[in-house]
């Protein structure tokens, strides 16, 4: 296998396994036969059980600092309670009155912090609008800024494609044309995928499961159960049956307590349009576009040209680095999802100091607490490499230890049933994992309050 072929294979695998690949409008992944119906939500709250971490998780409610970046973290249970009470669907000024005490939980310089500031400022002048309304209002300005960056890159890809055989040219130019349609909110032709439909239906069910309405939960369980009858592939033999299933799901919804549920109605309407081969308006996503380009050229024999095309496509601005891309990305979401996106990176999560994939155990001595973003970014890299990426880690680990000691001295450890030995064990593990580079001071534990 050539180096270029290995690069393409690795890139496709990276997209499909990354924690945020499902964030793109991934019709192409679904139509490629990637079964994602069993995958967890992209922005799942970090309450996934980790053996022996229950007592430490109880401290999430006491505003712990992240051991890597130092910001004060959100308690996942707090976010869950906000979602259950539909806080983010309320008028923006009310939302920000609730979030005001937690402004320090947004890491300065991140897209979330920038978006928070934009929404916070605009909410003062639009007391009756929700956070989605505010984003829609500023969207045209950021869309124009983003186009200035994207257009030259699309043109460069267009010119590069003309060096390829006609069949490759046509497919790349069609992909660019569809991308420009999406960017200008014009309709495009998207194939129906039962994988995509089932996945999105399950996500709606999971959201509804957070509430207290038993009738709504029963309706969603019935819809999900019936959706399993959809054939996995869409072709001449299966399309008529798929249409009947969608119509039947519509009948169930129409007679249920969820008959006015916006997301469900939209999902069914869009699915009918796809099955009827009708064009629909969908948002542009960078990852989906790059994935399409990779699939087109993966069998092209010139590896140097493959690399050049992929490198050019990767110049497209990301939502993690460009505010305009981030604003456009979240502006199409429902208010609840926008609020979720803003807070998710700052949620407290259990961090394995020695990653499980490297032999780390689910024991308290191997646990730290970090934001979901920092936890996700570290993956399984060695702790010393993490120190190079986050040179402020020693100070922030000390900040974390100092907060733990404060909670211990205030009786919180006894209240949640957590033994103070955890503080010493954490310090020792950090010393070992950093190969002696970090020596945390726990002497304040022994001082009389």
Image (cartoon, helix red, strand yellow):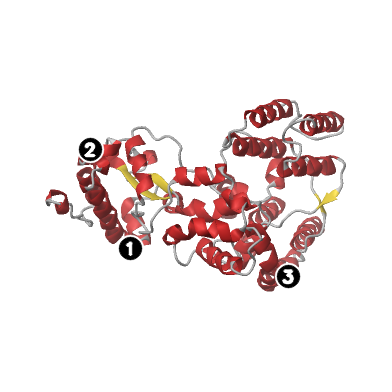
What is the number of the mark on residue 155? 3
Q: Nearer the viewer, residue 381 or 321?
A: 321
Q: Compared to 145, does 401 lie above or below?
A: above
Front disc: 3 or 1: 1
Left or right relative to 166: residue 442? left
Q: Compared to 148, does 320 lie above or below?
A: above
What is the number of the mark on residue 419? 2
Q: Secondary structure at mark 1?
A: loop
For the residues labelled 2 and 1, say whether their Cβ atoms are less than 8 Å apart. Answer: no
What residue do we see at 32% from left, 63% from top?
A: 392
Q: Report, in whole angstroms, how far the alpha carbon at label 3 lies from the one at label 1.
A: 39 Å
Q: Report, in whole angstroms, how far the alpha carbon at label 3 lies from the one at label 2.
A: 61 Å
Q: Nearer the viewer, residue 434 or 265?
A: 265
What residue do we see at 12% from left, 51% from top?
A: 448
What residue do we see at 81% from left, 29% from top?
A: 248
**Mark 1 Cα within 10 Å, few/some/many (few <14, many 20+)?**
some
Instruction: From the image, tell me which residue sits under label 1.
Output: 391
**Mark 3 Cα within 10 Å, few/some/many (few <14, many 20+)?**
few
Q: Position of residue 168 (x, y in %)?
A: 77, 56
Q: Report, in whole angstroms, how far the alpha carbon at label 2 lies from the one at label 1.
A: 30 Å
């Amino acid at each position: 296998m050539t180096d270029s072929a290995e690069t393409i294979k690795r890139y496709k695998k990276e997209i499909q396994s990354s924690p945020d690949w499902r964030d793109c409008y991934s019709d192409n992944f679904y139509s490629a036969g990637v079964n994602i119906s069993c995958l967890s939500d992209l922005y799942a709250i970090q309450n996934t059980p980790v053996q022996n971490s229950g007592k430490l998780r109880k401290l999430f409610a006491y505003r712990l600092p992240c051991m890597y970046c130092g910001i004060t973290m959100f308690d996942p249970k707090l976010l869950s309670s906000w979602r259950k009470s539909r806080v983010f669907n309320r008028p923006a000024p009310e939302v920000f009155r609730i979030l005001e005490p937690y402004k320090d939980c947004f890491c300065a310089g991140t897209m979330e912090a920038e978006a928070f500031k934009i929404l916070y400022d605009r909410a003062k002048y639009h007391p009756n609008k929700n956070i989605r309304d505010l984003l829609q209002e500023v969207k045209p300005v950021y869309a124009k800024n983003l186009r200035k960056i994207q257009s030259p890159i699309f043109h460069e890809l267009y010119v590069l494609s003309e060096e390829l055989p006609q069949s490759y040219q046509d497919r790349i130019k069609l992909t660019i044309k569809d991308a420009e349609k999406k960017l200008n909110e014009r309709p495009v032709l998207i194939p129906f995928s039962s994988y995509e439909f089932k996945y999105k239906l399950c996500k709606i069910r999971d959201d509804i499961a957070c509430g207290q309405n038993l009738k709504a939960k029963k309706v969603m369980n019935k819809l999900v159960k019936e959706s399993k009858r959809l054939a996995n592939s869409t072709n001449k033999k299966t399309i008529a049956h798929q249409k009947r299933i969608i119509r039947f799901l519509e009948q169930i919804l129409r007679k249920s307590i969820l008959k006015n549920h916006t997301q469900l109605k939209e999902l069914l309407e869009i699915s009918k349009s796809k099955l009827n081969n009708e064009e629909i308006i969908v948002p542009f996503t960078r990852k989906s576009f790059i994935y399409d380009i990779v699939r087109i050229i993966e069998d092209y024999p010139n590896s140097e040209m493959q690399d050049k095309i992929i490198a050019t496509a990767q110049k497209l601005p990301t939502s993690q680095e460009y505010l305009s891309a981030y604003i456009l990305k979240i502006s199409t979401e429902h208010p609840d999802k926008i609020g979720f996106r803003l807070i998710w990176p700052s949620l407290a999560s259990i961090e394995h100091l020695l990653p499980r994939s490297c032999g780390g155990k689910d024991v308290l001595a191997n646990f730290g607490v970090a934001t979901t973003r920092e936890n996700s970014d570290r993956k399984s890299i060695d702790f010393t490499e993490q120190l190079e990426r986050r040179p402020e880690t020693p100070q922030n680990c000390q900040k974390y230890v100092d907060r733990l000691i404060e909670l211990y001295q205030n009786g919180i450890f006894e209240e949640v049933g957590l033994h103070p030995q955890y503080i010493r064990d954490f310090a020792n593990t950090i010393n070992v994992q950093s190969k002696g580079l970090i020596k945390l001071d726990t002497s304040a534990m022994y001082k009389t309050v």
